[in-house]
Image (cartoon, rainbow, N blue to C red):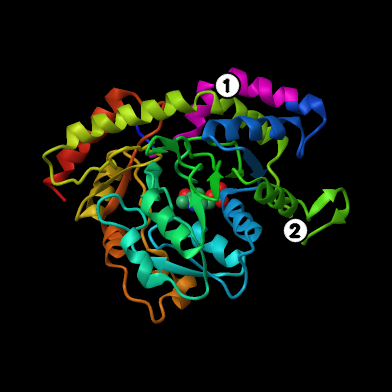
Amino acid sequence: MAIPQADPGANYRAHRAEIDAAIARTLESGRYILGPEVEAFEAEFAAYCGVAHASGVGSGTEALTLALRAVGVGPGDEVITVAHTAVATVAAIEAAGARPVLVDVDPVFYTLDPARLDAAITTRTRAVIPVHLYGQPADLAPIRDWTRRHGLWLIEDAAQAHGAIYHGRRVGSWGDLACFSFYPTKNLGALGDGGMVVTDNADLAERVRLLRQYGWRVRYISHIPGTNSRLDELQAAVLRVKLRYLEVENERRRALARRYTSLLAGSDVIPPTERPDACHVYHLYVIRYARRDQLRAALHSQGIGSTVHYPVPVHLQPAYSHLRLGRAALPVSEGLSREVLSLPLYPEMSEEEVERVASIVLGCLGGV
Ligand SMILES: Cc1ncc(COP(=O)(O)O)c(C=O)c1O
């Protein structure tokens, strides 16, 4: 039996009766855009994150762009983020009209290295976007201290880290704003696209709400130039069901990750390292291995799915060659892109399946 790297269909099947009922209720309601389901989900998700406000938007990418626009970041401004991330983080900065300035990640946890910030700041820097990559919180305390010291905005990219905890508080509650994605494979995944911006700041929450719908406070009257980026009622209704299971499913991911790590211990594979005083929610279980491509091919031939997150750091991608100019290389990001491999992990996986994948990985190591 093949084992995929992720399986959003299994999550639907696990909650089928409740999801089908939520969809039927929404269809019957006749309200499909920005209605009671979105409002209820916003309140529930804000409470879950431990913040005052949440605004549902069209995707995680748009959440980042609207968060940047809400704080006034635009053309002429620079935003510091990492090169070892989904290209969405960088695309969102450019969509806001600003210039991404890419820094390296640290070699142990693979998140923004606070020691790189001093070299990246210029008079045009306005914001920093750390990414909680693979479900692991970035080192928020020193990053937040640094942004405060320099009067910059801190916007968390929490697209991969719903429910992760750093120093006793959920990610999403550390930045001035934080952005989530509900892409179907995420720990909290919709049945299509969706995103959320959370914040404790009522003015910023209001600005995101204006921006997501043409700047309307009252219908058809635009107070500021906005766009169309709305979470729809069907997705919100489904996400409300899934939010109720997020804690249990994150715990399940963590248990399966622990099992992988203990099975792979002592091999040439480098398992993920959890940041102390943090709770990693294992959106992805990412190993490092020097002959990654050969291992991936060998796994594939035995029906084991795996993915590379990410094969090319953003500054080396064809679309972003302009970001490379005049910048130093980013050796950790570049090394990771050659070695990382995401093994199958999703809450519906059985322990036996994890054992099977680990044993196939170990069996392949000698031969690749
Ligand atoms: C780190 C990160 N940031 C941003 C995004 C963008 O989210 P979306 O796909 O919902 O636009 C994603 C997901 O794809 C992501 O993994």
Name the outermost residue toward the front: 149
Left or right side of 316 for 351 = left
Left or right side of 279 for 201 = right
Task: Return the residue at label 2.
Answer: 226
Q: Work out whether residue 25 or residue 137 is closer to the camera in this orientation and state it.
A: 137
Q: Is residue 77 above or below residue 9?
A: below
Bounds of the magenta segment: 5-25
Q: Is residue 232 magenta?
A: no
Q: Residues within 10 Å of mark 2 (few under 14, many from 20)?
A: some
Report the residue at 38% width, 56% height from top: 310
Report the residue at 20% width, 46% height from top: 270
Report the residue at 50% width, 46% height from top: 159
Image coordinates of residue 269 in percent, x first then y, are 18, 45
Name the outermost residue toward the bottom: 326
Q: Is residue 81 above or below residue 19?
A: below
State whether residue 257 appears in this view: yes
